[in-house]
Amino acid sequence: LAKTTQPISMDSYEGQEVNITCSHNNIATNDYITWYQQFPSQGPRFIIQGYKTKVTNEVASLFIPADRKSSTLSLPRVSLSDTAVYYCLVGDRMDSSYKLIFGSGTRLLVRP
Amino acid sequence: DGGITQSPKYLFRKEGQNVTLSCEQNLNHDAMYWYRQDPGQGLRLIYYSQIVNDFQKGDIAEGYSVSREKKESFPLTVTSAQKNPTAFYLCASRGEIPGQGNYGYTFGSGTRLTVV
């Protein structure tokens, strides 16, 4: 399973764009990159998933360079409610034996 | 709406007592998982099940037991052998994510277990 490295914490202000980068140097050919968001005392919630280049949905964008050894989650114009822990996970989403391995994630604090 | 339901939300256990945490899903997912989360930490895998009547130990299975008699249900029992059970427990299933068009994990809202 690919190991991921992401910053422990980040601070931002309301209205700013936040970019959280995740390093995954040993990503495998079949691996997808998935980001989850977790609020205190809640289960993680799926944000976005991608394999290469750029993916965008209504809440975020995911940028993946050609070598796929890193990825960047971009949150446009954050609000106070975006304060949460963000997890980057890498793995073969179709492998029936695949088990998610969570690190400590990135704690994002959005200030007024 | 499809999803995962965990109950109860809060649970208190006395020393030496076994307790069972419920996890039910209506997503028609084959694979289900139990994770434990301690304050300020990531998630650690307790048990997982890829299909009915089959389950495997995760990284911290000691003191826990599970069953998978039905596709929809994956209850976790915290036994008296688990010496430090106070934690937040999360159940997840794997398959198509509702409303997303992607394939991954859907989590329940968690059960907070406290030893009193």
Image: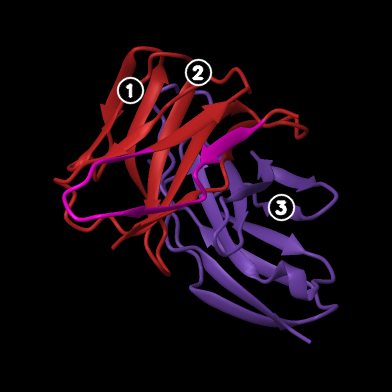
Task: Look at discs 1 and 2 and give the one toward the viewer.
Answer: 1
Segment tinted magenta in the rendering: B3-20
User: Looking at the rendering, in which quadrant would you find the N terminus of chain A?
Assistant: top left
Specify the subunit that label 2 lies on: B
Tell me, yes or no, whether dots 2 and 3 are on the same chain: no
Q: CA distance from mark 2 to mark 3?
A: 28 Å
The residue lying toward the viewer, choosing from B29 and B9, is: B9
Specify the subunit that label 1 lies on: B
| Residue A63 at least partly seen | yes
Task: Classify mark 1: helix, strand or loop.
Answer: loop
Q: Is residue A15 left or right of residue B106?
A: right
User: Looking at the rendering, in which quadrant would you find the C terminus of chain A?
Assistant: bottom right
Circles 1 and 2: CB atoms closer than 8 Å: no
Task: Give residue B30's mark.
Answer: 2
Chain B colour is: red
Tell me, yes or no, whether dots 1 and 2 are on the same chain: yes
Task: Look at discs 3 and 1 and give the one toward the viewer.
Answer: 1
Q: Residue at x 56, y 41 (%)?
A: B107
Q: How many marks?
A: 3
Q: Which residue is mark 1?
A: B67
Q: CA distance from mark 1 to mark 2?
A: 14 Å
Task: Classify mark 2: helix, strand or loop.
Answer: loop
In the image, the chain rendered in purple is A
Q: Which residue is mark 3?
A: A62
Q: Assess disc 3: are there few (<14), some (14-19) or many (≥20) residues with their C-alpha within 10 Å of its C-alpha.
A: many
